[in-house]
Image: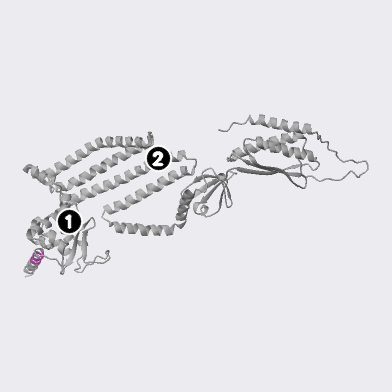
Amino acid sequence: MKNRLVVFLIFISAFTFAQQASKVDLSSPKATVYTHLKFLEDANYKPSKSARVFRNLTQAEAKDSAIKLKMILKGKGLKVDYDNIPVDPNYVDTTLVNKPNKYVLFKQLPEVYLVKIDNKWVYSDETIAEIEKLYNDVYPWYTQWIHELIPDAGRKSFLGIELWQLIALAIIIVSFLVLYFVLKEILALLLRKVQFMLFHKRNTNINVALNQVSRPIVVLILLYFVGKLLPSLLFPTDVNHFLIVLIEIVGTVYWIYVFLNIVKVIMSFYEEYTERTHSKLDDQLVPILKNFLRGIVIFVGFLKMLTVFGLDPTTVIAGASIGGIAIAFASQDTVKNLIGTFMIFLDKPFHIGDWIVAAEVEGTVEEVGFRSTRVRAFDTSLFQIPNSKLAEIVVNNKGLRKYRRYKTELGIRYDTPPELIEAFVKGVRELIILHPDTLSDQYNVEFTGFGNSALLILLNVFFIELDWNVEQSSKHRLHMAIVRLAKELGVEFAFPSSTVIIEQFPEKKGVDMKYNLSQDRIQKAIEKSKEEFRKSLEDYPKKD
């Protein structure tokens, strides 16, 4: 009795399933898609029932559209996952503004979608209008011609794949390799000729980069044609899906490789340009910009790779945006420094090698990085200033001065006669005019005051050379000429001292300085000092 009950239950289940399998159901998106594809399977081939998923077509037109739509999905390797198709009869697409009863079967094929009309889910009129175009795109004119040439021996099957399909796939692979080796040399030659026509010179680094670009470009071109040919081989959907995903993965990897090499070519041109510019800051920008562009290429390529593995592009972009915001909040200082870096390169407040004063830091700019700037102080210590701070504080760029100003005071003895003071001032002025590194029309040499121990003579000059080391050498030459002038004139430099009046003590006399005030001797002394200065200038290297 128990065995009879089990047999009865099995019979009822089989009967119920058979009833469901033979029933046309258009109550939900899942039911409609199941009806369309189930009645086109070899074991349950009833195209007249499958055609019910279309409206406003004749029976023949509906059958033809049903078959062609299934072939389109097969040729594109699009596998229907029934578990992910909504079963709700009142399903609404919430991603759309007006939120209609619409369901897109595949994101990769937005032209094909279902709509709810009169409580039935059917393929839209727009889908019907696109089927013929999509079919001709997936299966070009030569598809039928190829199948007519296949002999009966080629129809033998192995693991679900016919012999002619394997042979055709092998021919495609061999043709791919042969065309690759031929076309990459032709394309590399064309790219080199274009580069020479544009820039009228050859560059080894650019030529190497162009050769590297030509190879993946040829691969991508060939992959495109392989992707076009693949549906014509009529592989099963699973095989088509695997091969198409494989082509997309390889294509994405090669696109990343192409853009990385394009970045390399662009940066090679930019590097040549920076070498011709005076600013060294542009040279620092080359590696930073190169790494930044590479990062963008790799990041976009990574997002593309995620979509190849079936993730929704909208979801990926939204996730990347949310992740980017989270990372930005977690690393605000890094983002601020990055923005500061761009501000420095845009505004160019200083160049590499400039002497700057920024807050408590003073020194020469050695390097501008992605996060910070390195400044070498005069005691050789190294300051690393965050770019966010450097972009906000006041920077005194002494390296951008037109001239280097030098101001000092010469102190001579209080007992120096007025005639020698005038002669000394006149001589210093003529030495400045004679000096090759000073502005001869902008200087000041004046008797400006009385110090505690000396008569003060202001010396204010402008050196033409901006380099700090050259400035010190120029000062040295000027100082030596002034010292020689003072010696020839008999003018003595004062030093901190106190004068004790001893003339009023019995038999004590003060020091009586003997100055030669002969105008003829004073003029000869000035001329002699100038001549000695001219001769000393010959010992220094000439400027370019």
Q: Which residue does the numbered mark 2 point to in the structure image?
A: 269
Residue closest to the eye, 145 or 155: 145
Front one among 296 and 457: 457
Label 2 packing within 10 angstroms: few (<14), some (14-19), many (20+): some
Q: Residue 372: where, in percent of width, then height? A: 49, 50
Decide if residue 43 is in sight here: yes
Above or below, 95 against 533 in this view is: below
Give the residue at x 20% y 69%. Answer: 90
Q: Are marks 2 and 1 in contact (CB under 8 Å)?
A: no
Q: Mark 1 belongs to which amino acid?
A: Glu
SS for callout 1: helix
Picture coordinates of residue 7, whole percent (x, y): 7, 66
Q: Secondary structure at mark 2?
A: helix
- What main secondary structure does the magenta stretch of the protein show? helix
249 sits left or right of 480 in the view: left
Q: Quadrant of residue 461?
A: top right
State the residue at coordinates (21%, 46%): 227
Find the magenta span and give its range: 15-20
Is there any visible trace of residue 46 in the rendered image? no
How far from the left and from the top, in percent, is residue 130?
17, 56
Residue at the extreme right: 506
Residue type of the residue flagged with mark 2: Phe
Apparent side of residue 39 relative to residue 346 in the rendered image (left or right): left
Disc 1 crowd rating (10 Å Cα; few below 14, some 14-19, many 20+) is few
Which callout, 2 or 1, points at the residue further toward the start of the chain?
1
Residue 130: image tag: 1
**Distance of label 2 from label 1 (alpha carbons):** 46 Å
User: Is 19 a magenta residue?
Assistant: yes
